[in-house]
Image (cartoon, grey):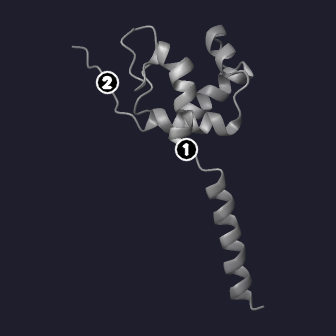
Amino acid sequence: MSAVSQSLLALGALCSAVLCDAADPNAALPRIKEVCQACHGMDGNSQLADNPKLGGQYPDYLAKALRDYQSGLRKNPVMAAFVDKLSRQEIENLAAYYSSQPAALVTKH
């Protein structure tokens, strides 16, 4: 097998591995409906000032925030309880879902 063929085969394997772990926003819907929407809303734009607006945030930021709640780096007992048993894939799915929603930013004058 030539070096080019081997390289293409390795690249194909790498791409398929990455695609298998790709975030699926739709997979997050059941958890969002059951848990998240009560505080953050279905689109991540809570009407309550105490709850962060998640819609339109960067997915890597949202995923890191959830991992930080899991590890205790971010301190919030409510969020810690909700994210305690989430898998890495579930976190990526939630982050992908909320990042795909419209942002609802408020400008104060």
Between 75 and 87, the one lying in front of the other is 87
Give the amino acid type for the residue marked by disc 1 in the picture. Answer: Asp
Give the quadrant of residue 31. top right
- Give the image location of residue 82, x and y in percent: 65, 17
The residue depicted at 42 percent of the width and 21 percent of the height is 53
Query: What residue do we see at 55% from left, 28% from top?
Result: 30
Label 1 sits on residue: 24
Classify residue 11 by image quadrant: bottom right
Q: Residues within 10 Å of mark 2 (few under 14, many from 20)?
A: few
Q: Nearer the viewer, mark 1 or mark 2?
A: 1
38 lies left or right of 73: left
Q: Residue furthest left?
A: 109
Which residue in the protein does label 2 denote?
Answer: 105
**Residue 6 location (% of width, % of height):** 74, 82
In the displayed structure image, the side of residue 106 where residue 8 appears, left or right: right
**Disc 2 residue type?**
Leu
Q: Find the distance from the CA under tag 1 to the CA under tag 2.
A: 25 Å
Q: Is residue 109 left or right of residue 8?
A: left
**Quadrant of the drawing holding the C terminus:** top left
Residue 35, position as x, y percentages in the image: 56, 18
Residue farthest to the right, as pictured? 1
As displayed, is residue 3 above or below residue 21?
below
